[in-house]
Image (spheres, rainbow, N blue to C red):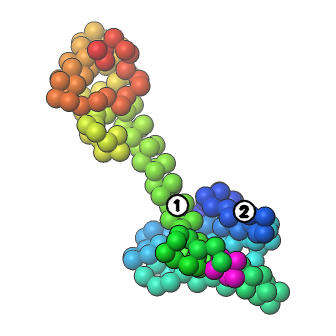
């Protein structure tokens, strides 16, 4: 299982009645098939009350109280969520769905950060271009030379400028912020 920071701040249902938080999310994407394989803790009003898990094979998420004292809180939470409803059509919002939503948000955010980090690393070495969606990009490289190396010589600067003009004329946008403005026009 992969660890996240100590507290997952992706979901807090905070009302005047109850504060529900999902924390300590650990996922294993390698074992995730139809659903996300994970384990997590659910806190109610600052107290760790439930243990949540999904084996990643498509079944429902299990949310279980940690002990007998927590069973009362479990029933209060279930009643409270049933009275809230997620939308007008759905009359109740099961605790399992709430946990699933948080875990989905957590995984999506982690994947977004991983993608952004990779794109920025690619932009250090290559010209990063895209058409309409910056989340779908292509890389243009100059063999073993990085952008920093090319910027040190007139020939390298010319190679960057030529590529920039070529792809801009084809309707691409440039993602790089490590290329001087005079080479981007």
Q: Residue at x 71, y 68 (%)?
A: 20
- Judging by the rendered image, the residue that carries numbered circle 1 is 105
Relative to 88, residue 147 above or below: above
| In front: label 1 or label 2 | 2
- Compared to residue 95, the image places residue 4 above or below, namely above
Residue at image x 76%, y 87%?
71
Dominant SS type (magenta): helix
The structure residue drawn at horizontal position 73% and vertical position 86%, both measured from the top left corner, is 75
Q: Which residues are magenta?
A: 78-82
Residue 39 percent coordinates (x, y): 59, 74
Residue shown at the point (78%, 64%) measured from the top left: 16
Q: Is residue 51 left or right of residue 185?
A: right
Farthest bottom residue? 68
**Which of 74/146 is in front?**
74
Disc 1 packing (10 Å; few <14; some 14–19; many ≥20): some
Left or right of 124 on screen, residue 90:
right
Q: Could you say where residue 99 lies in the image, as x and y percent from the top left?
A: 59, 72
First along the sequence among labels 1 and 2 = 2
Give 137 or 120, whichever is nearer the viewer: 137
Q: Secondary structure at mark 1?
A: helix
The quarter of the displayed image where residue 148 is located? top left
Residue 129, position in %: x, y?
Answer: 28, 34
Q: Let me know if residue 88 appears in the view.
A: yes
- Please provide percent x and percent y for residue 72: 79, 86
Asked if residue 124 is among those painted magenta in the image, a careful observer would answer no
Which residue extends farthest front? 88
Specify whether 177 is left or right of 94: left
Location of residue 84 by image quarter? bottom right
Tell me the residue that label 2 is attached to.
14
């Amino acid at each position: 299982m992969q660890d996240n920071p100590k507290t997952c701040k992706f979901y807090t249902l905070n009302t005047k009645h109850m504060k529900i938080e999902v924390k300590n999310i650990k996922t294993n994407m390698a074992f995730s098939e139809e659903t996300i394989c994970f384990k997590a803790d659910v806190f109610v009003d600052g107290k760790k009350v439930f243990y949540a898990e999904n084996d990643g094979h498509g079944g429902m998420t299990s949310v279980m109280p940690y002990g007998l004292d927590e069973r009362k809180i479990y029933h209060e939470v279930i009643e409270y969520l049933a009275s809230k409803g997620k939308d007008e059509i759905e009359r109740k919002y099961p605790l399992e769905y709430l946990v699933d939503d948080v875990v989905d948000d957590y995984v999506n955010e982690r994947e977004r950060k991983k993608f952004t980090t990779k794109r920025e690393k690619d932009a250090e070495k290559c010209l990063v271009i895209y058409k309409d969606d910056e989340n779908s990009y292509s890389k243009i490289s100059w063999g073993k030379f990085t952008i920093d190396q090319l910027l040190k010589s007139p020939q390298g600067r010319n190679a960057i400028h030529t590529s920039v003009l070529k792809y801009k004329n084809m309707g691409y946008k440039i993602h790089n912020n490590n290329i001087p403005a005079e080479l981007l026009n």
